[in-house]
Amino acid sequence: MQCMKTKFISQSSPVCCRVARALGSESRFSNSRVPTGLFVCRAGVLIALCAFAPAVSLQAQGLGHRPNKLPDIVQIVTPVSSGSWTVTGSLNAARFQHTATLLLNGMVLVAGGGNGTPNTLASAELYDPATAIWTDTGSLDNGRLDHTATLLPNGMVLVAGGGNTTDTLASAELYDPATGIWSGTGDLNSARLGHTATLLPNGMVLVAGGANSSGVLASAELYDPATGIWTNTGSLNTGRSRHTATLLPNGLVLVAGGIDNDGFLLTSAELYDPATGNWSATGDLNIARRDHTATLLPNGTVLAAGGFDDNFSPSRSAELYDPASGSWTATGDLNSGRYFHTATLLPNGSTLVAAGVGSTGVFASAELYDPASGNWTVTGSLNAARDRHTATLLPNGSVLVAAGDGSNSVLSSAELYETQAPGPTPRPTSTPRPRPSPAPRPTH
């Protein structure tokens, strides 16, 4: 592929390439120069659509020995879980790099994003799983993309930071599902995009890292819903953007990977302790990566998958973080390297990775990770290839994928992934071996 890095080319105050790489999200306002000086160099995109037949496993089982009878031979074929995508209602506005939040009432709130023009979106929409319809709700006060959205314990949604065509934003807003209205809340102490936001067990929200016009940030802040105020907390040991943040069962927050202020990808990882407000180093990733995903598995380990590698190529590698040992170990590789994908933990404990960008362009393919085997298997492909979309696990166990940047245009389409569980286990079919004929009686 050709250059996939974002460069800020300002007619009035050029920004050095180092900072451009740090800020780079491959956000595409348009395919050509825009008045604000944002230009994106992208390769031509091809759709990679692959069809794979579901696999089956064959098991042989011997029955217990019974006196005076040879064992029967039994074969049981166990189907592997698979899934498929179905088209659901389309959004009212095409968008990418938006956020999607599952509300306490079961609806999904989508907010902001870009639409391939020099403008960012302030509009927001609600998806009703009962009707499969999107309806407009109140608009943000400030259009933004590459922001974060966090569901608070009181049912409201906190949107923080992000960027528009001219600025990186420090503003934050609250969405009230009861009224459908957004209201301003306290500003971040530092404007940022490419950051993470994590709801802590004490109800506060931790925002960490990211970047702005000054470069990549090491600072972190805490939002208190009771006061609506952000306060600075301990800074990361390494400034980073495009990283992941995962709340661990022990209450610590694991931050991993990303890109630093010099444009280098990071292997380092850190732990935030809310009790002390400090960050401490933990084991390094085996592979430097950014724009990857991190998923907390039911056994308490964290699965990091895909992303850019050191060569700014889509990575197939995946690894597991063990909080008990503080170390990362390699696990099975993805079938297709990808970045700008999504990862969703399914009710059965497997992880669904969907779409993204790979070596051939924008993907429609999807894969399932089985923590028991450490392997990835291909599952049904999406109906539309997309990247920088959102994926939301619905209360009924299906996964809603919404919008994103397609191979030729920004998308308004949405799809639902449903797991097709294996059918009932077939009854064993006995194939008795012939019994030996009784020996003839001796003659006298």
Image (spheres, grey):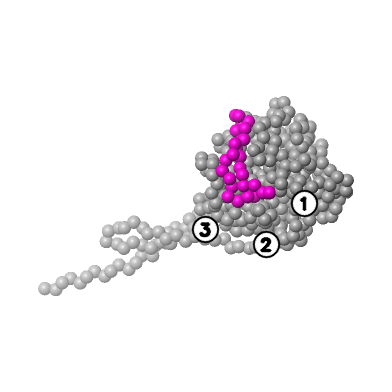
Does residue 306 lie above or below 103 as drawn?
A: below
Badge 1 element: strand
Q: Main secondary structure of the magenta part?
A: loop
User: Is residue 419 toward the left or the right of residue 406 in the image?
Assistant: left
* Structural distance between the alpha carbons of marks 3 and 1: 45 Å
Seen from the viewer's position, the closer of residues 358 and 397 is 358
Q: Tell me the residue at 77%/49% (across/down).
A: 17
Q: Which mark is residue 6?
A: 1
Return the disc, 2 or 3, that comes first in the chain's sequence: 2
Q: Residue 419 in magenta?
A: no
Q: Residues within 10 Å of mark 1 (few under 14, many from 20)?
A: many
Q: Tell me the residue at 60%/62% (across/down).
A: 52
Seen from the viewer's position, the closer of residues 263 and 146 is 263
Q: Quadrant of the C terminus?
A: bottom left
Residue position marked by numbered label 3 in the rendering? 79
- Asked where in the image residue 228 lies, by quadrant, the reply is top right
Measured from the top left, where is residue 83 in percent x and y?
60, 55
Dot 2 and dot 3 residues touching (CB under 8 Å): no
User: Amino acid under label 3?
Assistant: Pro
User: Amino acid under label 1?
Assistant: Thr
Q: Nearer the viewer, mark 3 or mark 1?
A: 1
Q: Tell me the residue at 79%/53% (across/down).
A: 40
Residue position marked by numbered label 2 in the rendering? 49
Q: Tell me the residue at 75%/42% (across/down).
A: 215
Q: Residue 291 in magenta?
A: yes
Seen from the viewer's position, the closer of residues 256 and 346 is 256
